Image (tube, rainbow, N blue to C red):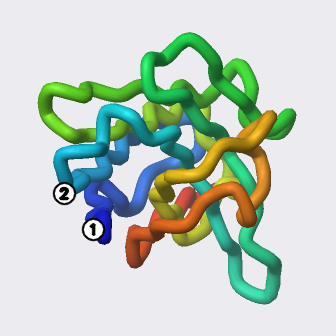
Amino acid sequence: QVQLVESGGGLVQAGGSLRLACAASGRTFSRYTMGWFRQAPGKEREFVLSITWNGDRTYYADSVKGRFTISRDNAKNTLYLQMNSLKPGDTAVYYCAAASRYYNTYVTRAAFDYWGRGTQVTVSS
């Protein structure tokens, strides 16, 4: 099975930036669509953004479009999430996910079958 480990979370002021990374194990990483989800206290886990294996398609939640950018370095088996113009509403545990199955789009939890344990992002007002 693929193992995913997130890093880069922490505390940042509103308007600031943060970069998350997800290190993946396994030789098949380069063929997996990868994504980021987040979950705030008392709320369901929600989609943030995702990227296909070759980077030709990206999917964004409306709440982060224009502020967050997803990228990947297949040679390093690493997924990134660049977060700019952070808002207190972005506070959540952020999860890295990998999809081994084909879907028309990659914006739901069901599309992803491998998950990291999450990293906390806190944005102060």
Compared with residue 123, is residue 20 higher up or lower down, i.e. above or below? above
Q: Amino acid at mark 1?
A: Gln
Marking on residue 25: 2
Tell me residue 70's x, y (percent): 50, 29
Circles 2 and 1, Cβ within 8 Å, touching? The answer is yes
Along the horizontal axis of the image, is 6 left or right of 12? left
Q: Is residue 89 visible?
A: no
Q: Is residue 7 above or below residue 80?
A: below
Q: Residues within 10 Å of mark 2 (few under 14, many from 20)?
A: some
Residue placed at 55% from the left, 46% from the top? 35
Label whose residue precedes the other's in the sequence (2 or 1): 1
Marking on residue 16: none
Instruction: Label 2: state its secondary structure.
Output: loop
Q: Nearer the viewer, residue 108 or 37?
A: 108
At horizontal 18% and vertical 57% (from top left) the residue drawn is: 25
Residue 52 position in % (x across, y down):
54, 28
SS at badge 1: loop
The residue that mark 1 highlights is: 3
Q: Residue furthest top?
A: 56
Q: Residue furthest bottom?
A: 42
CA separation in Å, label 2 and label 1: 5 Å
Asked if residue 15 shows in the view, the reply is yes
